[in-house]
Amino acid sequence: MTVEVTLLKQYPLFSDLNETQLREVAQLCEAECFYPDHILLKEGQPGTKIFILVKGEVELLFTIGEERPTRVGLATAGEIIGCPGLVPPYTNTATARSLTETEVLAIDIADLRELFEQDCPLAVSIQRHIIQSLLDCIVGLRLEVGG
Amino acid sequence: MTVEVTLLKQYPLFSDLNETQLREVAQLCEAECFYPDHILLKEGQPGTKIFILVKGEVELLFTIGEERPTRVGLATAGEIIGCPGLVPPYTNTATARSLTETEVLAIDIADLRELFEQDCPLAVSIQRHIIQSLLDCIVGLRLEVGG
């Protein structure tokens, strides 16, 4: 299912884009729904999609040594999942698994990178928001490390 | 002290830049040295500089609740310090303190953001490497959280 520009405007990731850019991004987005226990991304696999979580909860699992994957994060509405697929080595650093019924906007990374090539200011704007999102994640992890 | 283009080429942050772009960045860089116990950045303050650590060790301190700042990271040669100053709200999320004699390349953030405005592909390239660096930091913190 394709998505409306008005929906995209709700997400910080796209908040600096103009109407033309929003329409370009909307053409790449698919609204998808998953049941609980669906694997959205698998650690160590090539990143093919990024997801903006619209509704639901997704846990992030990470393998430490030879142990079973450990939960290292919980994504809730508004968060972006799958950023590692956007930069070399284009590989997921965690597994993402839905805990509840989940709605997402899914964007094909190959298409998004092509759009980045065509529209440099759009790339800068989206990257800037990804940086903010990763910095928020770092602050959250620091609280866990130190707490 | 200004820096040479050849020095910049050693750092991944600048590895995709062409000669012209490297010269533009070199003009913004200052080589600086600090004694141990120098505060490079202070948590909660506006970010005015980013640093590429050339030599030495810098600890990152973070305030959790009302406690004294806790060490949440250790930066070593090649790492970037001060990324939060590049994106809204342009505020340092940690204090950075040298543990040893330390050499850095310091870049004024206002100047760098101006260069980003003038040269969009340069901004995309540098931001991509910042995203990679933050993802590395997240993986390191996950190891600590789960370990």
Image (cartoon, coloured by chain):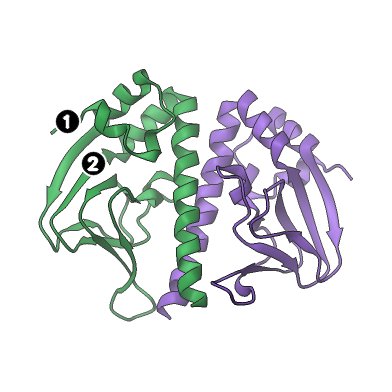
Chain colours: A purple, B green
Q: Residue at x 35, y 34 (%)?
A: B112
In front of the other: B64 or A37: A37
Q: Amino acid at mark 1?
A: Thr
Residue B34: x %, y % from top left? 12, 52
Q: Is residue A18 visible?
A: no
Q: Chain of mark 1?
A: B
Q: Is residue A64 visible?
A: yes
Q: Residue at x 62, y 43 (%)?
A: A15
Helix, strand or loop at label 2? It is strand
The picture quadrant where one finds residue A120 is: top right
Residue A3: x %, y % from top left? 83, 43
Q: Earlier in the sequence, mark 1 or mark 2?
A: 1
Horizontal side of B63 relative to A60 (left or right) equals left
Q: Amino acid at mark 2?
A: Leu
Asked whether the residues under marks 1 and 2 belong to the same chain, the reply is yes
Disc 2 target residue: B105
Helix, strand or loop at label 1? It is loop
Distance in Å between CA atoms under marks 1 and 2: 9 Å
| Quadrant where the image shows the N terminus of chain B | top left
Q: Residue at x 49, y 26 (%)?
A: B121
Residue farthest to the front? A66
Horizontal side of A105 relative to B36 (left or right) equals right
Horizontal side of A31 relative to A84 (left or right) equals right
Residue farthest to the right? A1
In the image, is residue A55 above or below residue A20?
Answer: below
In the image, is residue B17 above or below residue B49?
Answer: above
Disc 1 target residue: B2
Instruction: Please give the label number shown on residue A91.
Output: none
Residue A89: x %, y % from top left? 56, 45
